[in-house]
Image (tube, grey):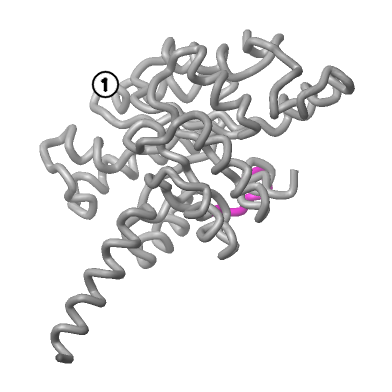
Amino acid sequence: MKYSIKKRMQTGETVFGTWCMLPSSFVVDVIACTGIDFIVLDMEHGTLSWETAEEMVRAAQLHNCQPIIRVGDDQENTILHALETGCEALMVPHVSTPKAAQKIVNAALYSPKGARGLSPYTRCHNYTHVGLNKSMDRHAEDTLVGILVEGKEGIENLPEIVQVEGIDLIYLGMYDISQSINLPGQLEHPDVLTQLVKCLKIIKSSGKFAGTFSRDVKTCKSYKNMGFDFIAYVADSYALTSFYKKFNQDINISI
């Protein structure tokens, strides 16, 4: 898989991507053709249907960009749907305990590492039982299982969560972390950054990949230097609104 960010992170590379809130394969096509490493398709806060999500996965893969589906819950059927779109990376929100993390592993990985349901007649296995064992071996190697640790309970349980085998990426939800210490949206506040550094050290010491979110390029570079492996830069909806707000301001000033 040319676009596998899992393999790239395993070699020590930091990958950069963005969030996609808008339910459109055309939007993904536009973003992916820029050469960005990954696009997270947001099915928690976005309005994506499964049919639209699969089209968006295809659009990203067309440009060798890693699609990732952020599902809306940790239910087995939800995780199965996400992976059977042919998307080989997922992120599950609001993980606060090792038990919850293990449940996700069981749903995302085939036996013996998990208990994921199997049907060869889906996009992830090219719609055929021919070569199924080889396809399953590839999925065992390439599937990226990510979780979002976002609240106070999750942070407190992080030392135990990172011990769960089968979890590859732990993404620190900055907005929820800031909210959990009564500083909602203040992502650069010293107390928020202190919490971030504390969590990063725990994740890195476990050998898992660490991910987070940034609102500007300067912070992206700072997070890379800190040791983050996976950095998501804003979202498509913000990129559009900020661009046209600036245009509107500039054109009115010039007039």
Q: Residue furthest bottom?
A: 254
Q: Quadrant of residue 87?
A: top right
> What residue appears at the point 27 percent right and 65 percent down from the top-left corner?
242
> What residue appears at the point 61 percent right and 30 percent down from the top-left corner?
85
Picture layout, residue 85 above or below residue 76: below
Identify residue type, mark 1.
Glu
- Residue 94 shows in this picture: yes
Picture layout, residue 178 above or below residue 51: below
Q: Toward the viewer: 69 or 159? A: 69
Query: Which range of residues does the magenta coloring cover?
Result: 9-15
Report the quarter where the N terminus lies.
Answer: top right
Q: Residue under circle 1? A: 153
Q: Secondary structure at mark 1?
A: helix
Q: Position of residue 248 (x, y in %)?
A: 20, 76
Picture layout, residue 182 above or below residue 27: above
Q: Is residue 249 left or right of residue 74?
A: left
- Residue 207 shows in this picture: no
Q: Position of residue 47 (x, y in %)?
A: 36, 36
Q: Residue furthest right?
A: 130
> What residue appears at the point 55 percent right and 49 percent down from the top-left corner?
38
- Count of numbered circles on the image: 1
Q: Quadrant of residue 250?
A: bottom left
> What residue appears at the point 63 percent right and 18 percent down from the top-left corner?
109
Q: Toward the viewer: 38 or 223? A: 38
Q: Quadrant of residue 184?
A: top left
Near mark 1 (Cα within 10 A), the count class, few <14, some 14-19 or many ≥20, is: some
Q: Position of residue 74 (x, y in %)?
A: 43, 17
Q: Toward the viewer: 208 or 27? A: 27
